[in-house]
Amino acid sequence: MAISKSDARRLCTKREWEMLVQSWPPELSKVTPGRLRQKVQRARNLRDKYRDLARQQAGEARGKRNPKSTRPAQGNQNTRLKAQIFDEALERFQARLADMET
């Protein structure tokens, strides 16, 4: 299920949001192949970051891991949503790059 743009905007930082905007049409068609490769890498890094953080938070919430801060994470819904947001952006960037290379 795709995340709505309003939910994505609420969850993302300014810099993350700017990258996401470029993953949707018509902005996606304006990105050059070189920049597109950079965006693929950045989206992959952000997806992995939030996926790993969600895994850490889930362990803390279950009591299986030591908390990284003074109190354990209570949930990880927003972190999982951010991982999904960047996974979807990565797919859009990769599909556009594949179209440009053929």
Image: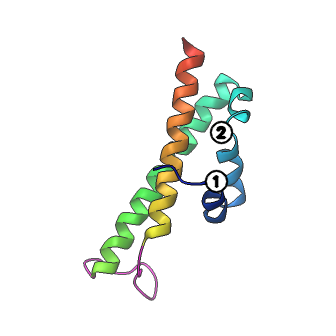
Magenta stretch prevailing secondary structure: loop
The answer to whether residue 74 is left or right of residue 2 is: left
Asked whether the residues under the numbered discs 1 and 2 touch, taking CB atoms below 8 Å apart as contact, a structural biologist would say: yes
Instruction: State the residue in front, 76 or 42.
Output: 76
Q: Secondary structure at mark 1?
A: helix
Residue bearing the label numbered 2: 24
Q: Given the image, on which type of amino acid does mark 1 rest?
A: Lys
Marker disc for residue 5: 1
Q: 74 above or below 52?
A: below
Indicate the position of residue 49 as horizontal and vertical percent values. Answer: 47, 56
Coloration of the structure image: rainbow
Question: Which residues make up the magenta segment?
Answer: 63-75
Within 10 Å of disc 2 (Cα), the crowding (few <14, some 14-19, many 20+) is some
Q: Secondary structure at mark 2?
A: loop
Indicate the position of residue 25 as horizontal and vertical percent values. Answer: 68, 34
Q: Say which residue appears at 67% left-offset and 45% top-offset.
A: 19
Q: Say which residue appears at 35% left-offset and 64% top-offset.
A: 55
User: In which quadrant of the rendered view does residue 89 lie?
Assistant: top right
**Residue 53 falls within the magenta-colored stretch:** no
Q: Given the image, on which type of amino acid does mark 2 rest?
A: Trp
**Residue 65 falls within the magenta-colored stretch:** yes
Q: CA distance from mark 1 to mark 2?
A: 10 Å
The answer to whether residue 50 is left or right of residue 8 is: left
Instruction: State the residue in front, 42 or 87.
Output: 87
Indicate the position of residue 24 as horizontal and vertical percent values. Answer: 65, 39
Q: 96 above or below 13?
A: above
